[in-house]
Structures are given as C-alpha cells and as structure tokens.
Amino acid sequence: MTNAPVRYIVLHYSATYADQDLGVEDIRKMHLDRGFNDVGYHYIIKRDGTVQKGRADSTVGAHVAGHNTGSIGICCIGGLERASGPNVGVDNRTDAQKAATIRLVRDLLVRHPGAQVVGHRDLAPTLCPGFDVRSWWASVDTGSASTIAAPEIPPTIRNGSRGEAVSDAQHRLRARGYDIIADGIFGPRTEATVRQFQRANGLAADGIIGPKSWAALLD
Ligand SMILES: [Zn+2]
C-alpha cells in the first residue's frame, strides 16, 4: 500500500522516561510485542539527537489510528518524568532532539509540500506527544532552506557479526519477504539472504552489508 500523498507529519513521544536511552530496536521490540509486523514509526529520534530510520517512508505506518495512510510518524524518545509518573506526558525533548526534529521535518516538507505538522493528540484521543506541536512548529519554522537530517547509517556487518545492527537488517529483510530469522546473528543463512537481496537490487552480491546495501535496506 503506497503511503501517499502525505498530508500529515505526526510527532510522537515514546512514553518512556528521560533517562531511558532507547532506540529503533527497542521500539521495534515493543511494537512486535503489540502485534505489529515492524516498528510503527518512520523515524526515531534518540535522546542524543541521532535520527534512526524506522519504516520506509513509502510504507504505511502504524502510529495514529485512522490516519496511518498519508502520514509520516516521527517518535522522539522520552515524554515521561520519574517525578510525575507514567500518566503525565511532558515535553522533555533534549535540545539535540529538537534540532534534529526541525531538520528532519524541514526535509520532509521539501519532499511532501503542503503536509501539516501536527501532534498525535491533534488526530486522536491521546496525550502524545505532551505538547502543542502546531504552536511549537509555528515558533521554530523560519522557513529557511532544508538541511537534510540524514538517518545514521549503521555499521558494516558481515558473516560473524552480532548485535542490534544485525537484527535490524534481518528485520528489514523479513519486511521485504525474505525467509530469515531476526536473531541478531549474522551466519551463513543471513549471508545467503543478503546476497539474494543484493542481486535483486543491482548491488554487488558480496554478502556484506556496507553503506550501499544499508541505503537500499533503509529506503
Ligand atoms: Zn503517539
């Protein structure tokens, strides 16, 4: 299903505490536990401002009931404070997260002119993301030229690699229909699958996921 035209850029929080340094793999695990087939958001912005790619922009997300088609979901990690507990959403984005959000939203607006920048709570009964996105965006959007907030390219991985980047790649291959287990271990089966993916995408079929293969996987 094609996620177009994009009418809304929707900001979210992860409803986690400011001292929890989560990333795309943590959010993906939560969403898989909820029965989604992948992380529901298109972008994750970590506490340090790192932008991570979730779903492909062209894939319909799972982040806002009734408006998933035609929207891009961005999740800033955070939104809760220990002092106020789990039921009070606040805007506790770091300066790095705010700056990354501004760059990313500007870039998305270049690609999707006319899209509205809104919060989850503008479209559904929720507190997320804990602040008034429209007025925040109006206060920061100076209309200056876009600076691309490029999602980070994960490290090069190959046979023998283990860890988060491996399971991230495996999940992305699964999402493309490849029969592979996302166990975070890059073994012969993963290598063979990577070669298949590379051949199907006109890449050198070396079985190693470097910058070019990552770019294709993250697209
Ligand atoms: Zn939300």
Image (tube, rainbow, N blue to C red):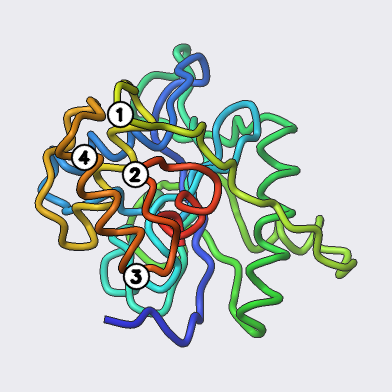
Mark 4 — residue? 190
Mark 2 — residue? 207
Q: Position of residue 196 (x, y in %)?
A: 25, 58
Residue in the picture at 45% in, 17% down: 20
- Could you tell whether 1 is left or right of 48 in the image? left
Specify the amino acid type for callout 2.
Gly
Residues under numbered marks 1 and 2 in contact, where contact means CB atoms less than 8 Å apart? yes
Q: Nearer the viewer, residue 131 or 217?
A: 217
Specify the amino acid type for callout 1.
Asn
Report how far apart the C-alphas of labels 2 and 3 lie in the structure: 25 Å
Q: Nearer the viewer, residue 95 or 205?
A: 205
Q: Position of residue 47 (x, y in %)?
A: 58, 27
Mark 1 — residue? 159
Mark 2 or 3: the one toward you? 2
Specify the amino acid type for callout 4.
Thr
SS at badge 1: loop
- Earlier residue among tags 3 and 4: 3
